Amino acid sequence: TGAIMQYNLIKAGDIVLSDVATSIAPINTIFEGDMINVSVTGLEWELLPESNWTNDTTLYWEMAANSAVQQTGTYDLTELGEDRVLPVEIECGSTTINEGGTIEISVKLTLNSTEQSTSSEYQSFSAGISIIPLIIVLALAMTTQMVELSLFSGIFVGACIVTGNIEDGFKTTLSDYILDALADVDHVYVILFTLFLSGMVGMMQKS
């Protein structure tokens, strides 16, 4: 007898992007020309009534960017290993984005004629945008002569680019780049050195 599919997919979960070149995951911003892997996590299943059991154990997936299909594929749910656990995360191919702006990555999953889909929007930038935080730091440092303000502004702008929006950029700046940095001894040494250096420069200017 063939394999019997006793479960149905009831939720597609969330999309997770990872950078192929650096293996960094998850990423919230796409850079033009960089290849990204697309995964779906948080899949949810439900047990079907025995009358609805089927021999179709193939899960079909379709990944698209701005409604343009990038890749398709299948998973045989009978090849789950010895523990026979249904997957909560699957990989759905890879793609390269060659345009800027808002990109909607979507994945459609089909099992036993039942479709579940999920999508997320990401900002796509050219690689040259990564130099903007450095330019801001240098420009502010030369005009305001305030090292701390200049560094914070550069970090904030960089975090906004990475997260894709101002709100998440502000949260990331505070949680990851300030609080977490203050909890690291090596980072504290760098901060103290910067403060002492700026103080020395200020004393030299007044003398």
Image: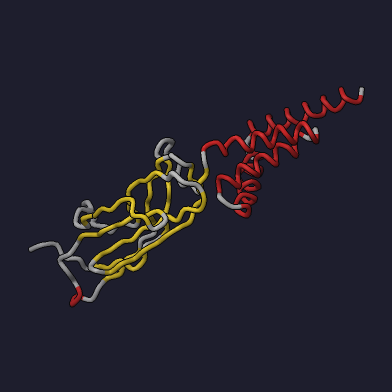
56, above or below 91, in the image: below
Q: Specify the color scheme.
A: secondary structure
Residue 125 rendering spot, x and y as whole percentages: 52, 44
106, above or below 29, in the image: below
Residue 193 rendering spot, x and y as whole percentages: 73, 27
Q: Residue furthest left?
A: 1
Q: Is residue 37 left or right of residue 145?
A: left
Residue drawn 52% across the image and 37% down it: 127
**How many tags in the picture?**
0
The foreground one among 151 and 89 is: 151
Q: Is residue 9 left or right of residue 15?
A: left
Residue drawn 21% across the image and 59% down it: 58
Residue 140 rendering spot, x and y as whole percentages: 75, 36
Q: Residue furthest front?
A: 99
The foreground one among 54 and 20 is: 20
Residue 139 rendering spot, x and y as whole percentages: 73, 34
The quarter of the rendered structure image containing the C terminus is: top right
The quarter of the rendered structure image containing the N terminus is: bottom left
Q: Residue furthest right?
A: 207
